[in-house]
Image (cartoon, grey):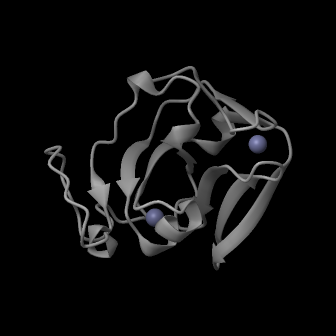
Amino acid sequence: MTGLAGRCLCGAVRWVSDGVVTRRLACHCADCQRATSAPFTAFVGLPPETVTWSGEIAHFESSPGTHRGFCSACGTRLYFRSSRWPGEIHIHAATLEDGSGYAPDCHVVTSDSPAWLHLDDGLPSHSGFHTDPARG
Ligand SMILES: [Zn+2]
Ligand SMILES: [Zn+2]
């Protein structure tokens, strides 16, 4: 996947990237659940220098060194960036203008999944993070 673009719900924030996708995952961690008001969220990872943003983005530091960006007008969650993954920005895949070419390739931090959630998509499922964040 290259040549990606996305936007928030109201359209005030837009992004484009010509970068090569570094990661596609569905995160079930408790922080992502609370931040998105959803049982889990799908991310598309990209090299941050390949992403161009427009519009006003507000940030919340959900843990030291970890920032979650959102549209200051409509509140749509835009991305997760952490000093633990310095070489990539994790953009919420739901913001993709055309998400038809996207699918996560694994589920992570499923130890935090709600008990009622049962997935049978056949994807690898990891109770924690599936790779050492430092090595990406
Ligand atoms: Zn917006
Ligand atoms: Zn998470």
**Point 40% across, 58% down: residue:** 40
Q: Residue furthest front?
A: 116
Residue 58 position within the rendered picture, expressed as x and y whole percent measured from the top left: 80, 58
- Horizontally, residue 130 falls left or right of residue 49, namely left
**Position above or below: 112 against 122:** below
Residue 39 position within the rendered picture, expressed as x and y whole percent measured from the top left: 40, 62
Where the C terminus falls, by quadrant?
Answer: bottom left
Among the 4 quarters of the image, the one containing residue 46? top right
- Horizontally, residue 57 falls left or right of residue 46, namely right
**Point 53% across, 63% down: residue:** 37
**Point 53% across, 67% down: residue:** 84
Residue 65 position within the rendered picture, expressed as x and y whole percent measured from the top left: 65, 73
Where the N terminus falls, by quadrant?
Answer: top left
Among the 4 quarters of the image, the one containing residue 27? bottom left
Residue 118 position within the rendered picture, expressed as x and y whole percent measured from the top left: 19, 59
Out of 33 and 82, give the one closest to the viewer: 33
**Position above or below: 18 against 105:** above
